[in-house]
Image (cartoon, rainbow, N blue to C red):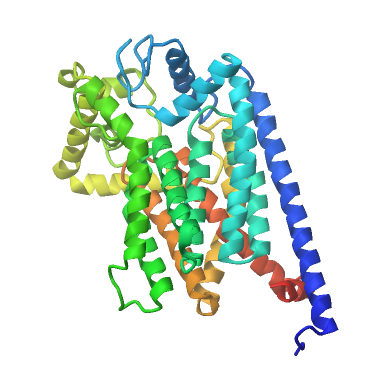
């Protein structure tokens, strides 16, 4: 046992500081490499807008941004996906990401490569830094570093970082939300101005994420319930006391107010241009209708071949005269009717989406870029994800702190709920990427667990540090 202020304790303190400094240096190197890889992807994709595999939507975002800066608002010069007529307003695409592109084009000129480069730098830094913070807070510094490295070198992430689509910023927003949530739980007893600013920060993170992809709304109730339960328990120390613990309720209200302030202007805009209520975007109905159409039978196909089987041709002719918002609502009702007409088919169709959503093997129908990305990203990390989850949930669960257990529950609940949303509607590998970002934390846990198990020297130094 080391006495207080003894020379041994002083040397141990210096050793810990040196290890921490070394870890921070490694983090800086990882962040720099992440940025370099994403910049390479951005520069490779260049100044032209093409339909590269998985990032077809950049054609739409580029065209929409150009229309915005030319003064035509959120519309297209010609008829456009999903069923938007020329010159008519659209709410199908993310307002926030369109405004990001429009701002870049307005300042620097219509050079897509500049928007790609700026996006790559932001993502390379923020994604890597946030996943490091989550892994470090939830487990330890080494897990955080490995998670950051996995994120930096994950082919999907630096490939999509060069594409002018929402995925990169959306994943960053989700990591920011989890970072805010864990900090709120860890420092719940702090109180004061900083405590309330964290609720405001969470509201900003949620608002920006929802403006990029409204699908995160479905996870919002669970996140709020998790925050209420954990912060209330942390502050009272007793689950049976103060079920309506007002500091938590007030904090959630602050977050909700921030979200409302960010979303309501777009809801008002939608009401004015469509004469219909649309909270944010008009894509849920289209996706649910197309994703569950009887044309699939019981086997889902990620992308239909076109021609007579094109998505537009599947829309009933009597609905095509409706504006985008009313058509979206009508298609949602038709999609729900598909389920009530044949629930067994819907169940089998949803099950058939599982291989497509979690695909990690090469496919002859996919391009070379897609196959390399799939195997080199999810395929390599999957064994470590399984091992990490097995070690965490089966072997190490009893030794975890309450904070670690509930943090794990939060992340795994997101993985399950978010995956279920797409398995029940429309499954593409691109839609799985936010799940990949979270699962890499558990892959890092598995890697560190293996290292500590088979390399005694590493285990000894880590134990001294932790």
Is residue 350 or residue 99 the one in the foreground? 99
- Extreme-front residue of the structure: 192
Is residue 441 or residue 18 the one in the foreground? 18
Vertical placement of 154 versus 236: above or below?
A: above
Vertical placement of 96 versus 76: above or below?
A: below
Which residue is drawn at the image coordinates 43% and 49% (left, top)?
200
Which residue is drawn at the image coordinates 65% and 30% (left, top)?
41
Looking at the rendering, which quadrant does residue 238 occupy?
bottom left
Vertical placement of 210 versus 249: above or below?
A: above
Q: Is residue 312 visible?
A: yes
Q: Position of residue 279 (x, y in %)?
A: 27, 35
Which residue is drawn at the image coordinates 77% and 87% (left, top)?
2
Q: Position of residue 423 (x, y in %)?
A: 35, 46
Q: Position of residue 65 (x, y in %)?
A: 46, 19
Is residue 420 or residue 113 the one in the foreground? 113
Q: On the rendered structure, is 244 left or right of 70?
A: left
Q: How many marks?
A: 0
* Quadrant in which the N terminus is drawn: bottom right
Q: Is residue 309 visible?
A: no
* Quadrant in which the C terminus is drawn: bottom right
Q: On the rendered structure, is 80 left or right of 119?
A: left
Q: Position of residue 344 (x, y in %)?
A: 21, 49
């Amino acid at each position: 046992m080391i006495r207080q202020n003894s020379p041994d304790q002083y040397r141990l303190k210096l050793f810990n500081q040196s290890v921490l400094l070394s870890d921070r240096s490694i983090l800086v190197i990882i962040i720099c490499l992440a940025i370099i890889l994403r910049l390479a992807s951005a520069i490779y994709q260049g100044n032209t807008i093409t339909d590269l595999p998985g990032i077809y939507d950049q054609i739409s975002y580029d065209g929409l941004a150009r229309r915005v800066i030319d003064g035509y608002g959120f519309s297209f010069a010609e008829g456009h996906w999903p069923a938007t007529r020329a010159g008519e307003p659209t709410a199908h695409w993310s307002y926030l990401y369109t405004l990001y592109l429009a701002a870049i084009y307005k300042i620097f000129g219509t050079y897509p490569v500049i928007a790609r480069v700026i996006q790559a730098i932001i993502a390379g830094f923020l994604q890597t830094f946030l996943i490091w913070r989550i892994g470090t807070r939830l487990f330890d510094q080494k897990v955080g570093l490995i998670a950051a490295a996995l994120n930096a070198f994950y082919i999907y992430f630096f490939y999509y970082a060069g594409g002018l689509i929402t995925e990169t910023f959306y994943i960053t927003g989700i990591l920011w939300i989890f970072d805010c949530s864990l900090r709120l739980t860890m420092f719940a007893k702090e109180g004061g101005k900083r405590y309330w600013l964290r609720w405001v920060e969470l509201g900003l993170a949620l608002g920006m994420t929802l403006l990029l992809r409204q699908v995160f709304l479905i996870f919002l109730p669970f996140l709020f319930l998790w925050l209420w339960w954990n912060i209330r328990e942390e502050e009272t120390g007793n689950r049976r006391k103060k079920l309506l613990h007002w500091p938590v309720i007030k904090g959630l209200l602050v977050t909700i107010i921030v979200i409302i302030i960010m979303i309501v202007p777009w809801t008002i805009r939608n009401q004015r241009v469509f004469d219909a209520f649309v909270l944010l975007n008009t894509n849920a109905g289209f996706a649910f209708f197309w994703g569950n159409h009887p044309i699939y039978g019981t086997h889902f196909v990620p992308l239909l071949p076109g021609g007579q089987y094109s998505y537009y041709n599947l829309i009933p002719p009597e609905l095509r005269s409706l504006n985008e918002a009313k058509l979206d609502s009508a298609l949602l009702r038709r999609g729900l009717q598909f389920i009530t007409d044949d629930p067994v088919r819907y169940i089998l169709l949803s099950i058939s989406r599982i291989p497509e959503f979690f695909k990690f093997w090469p496919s002859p129908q996919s391009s070379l870029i897609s196959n390399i990305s799939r195997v080199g990203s999810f395929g390599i990390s999957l064994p470590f994800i399984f091992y990490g989850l097995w070690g965490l949930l089966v072997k190490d669960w009893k030794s975890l702190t309450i904070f670690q257990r509930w943090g794990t529950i939060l992340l795994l609940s997101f993985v399950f709920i978010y995956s279920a949303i797409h398995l029940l509607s429309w499954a593409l590998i691109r839609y799985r990427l936010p799940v990949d970002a979270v699962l890499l934390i558990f892959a890092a846990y598995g890697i560190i667990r293996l290292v500590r198990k088979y390399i005694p020297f590493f285990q000894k130094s880590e134990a001294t540090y932790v």
